Amino acid sequence: MDIRNSVLKLIAANDGKWSWYQIERALSARNINSEGRLMSLILSLVSDELVVELSSSELPQPKYAITDKGRVVLTTAD
């Protein structure tokens, strides 16, 4: 599985609860090296409308949630 699908699966599993930091830590725990490209990858997922960024003044960092389109991509990737 490529890193893009790994990130998408982590976002889906923790829908709207994780920021980039938690995603990075989970990748690291799975020995998946994001090599400083995680934010550009997340922004790409947002641009492709697979993920949405949830932000507010109450959140210290934006959180990420999967979209319906992202769920379709995950089901076809397996």
Image (cartoon, grey):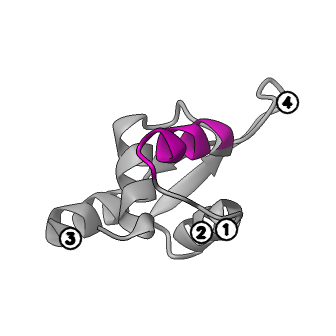
Tell which circle, 4 or 3, labels the residue nearer the N-terminal end.
4
Compared to residue 25, the image places residue 47 above or below, namely below
The residue that appears at 67% across and 68% down in the rendered structure is 37
Q: CA distance from mark 2 to mark 4?
A: 24 Å
Mark 1–mark 2 CB contact (< 8 Å) = yes
Q: Residue furthest front?
A: 31
Does the magenta-highlighted stretch encompass residue 74?
Answer: no
Question: Which residue is under mark 3?
Answer: 77
Q: Mainly helix, strand or loop, the magenta region?
A: helix
Horizontal arrangement in the rendering, residue 15 relative to residue 78 (left or right): right
Tell which circle, 1 or 4, labels the residue nearer the N-terminal end.
1
Q: Amino acid at mark 1?
A: Arg
Q: Which mark is residue 57?
A: 4
Mark 2–mark 3 CB contact (< 8 Å) = no
Q: Amino acid at mark 3?
A: Ala
Tell which circle, 3 or 1, labels the residue nearer the N-terminal end.
1
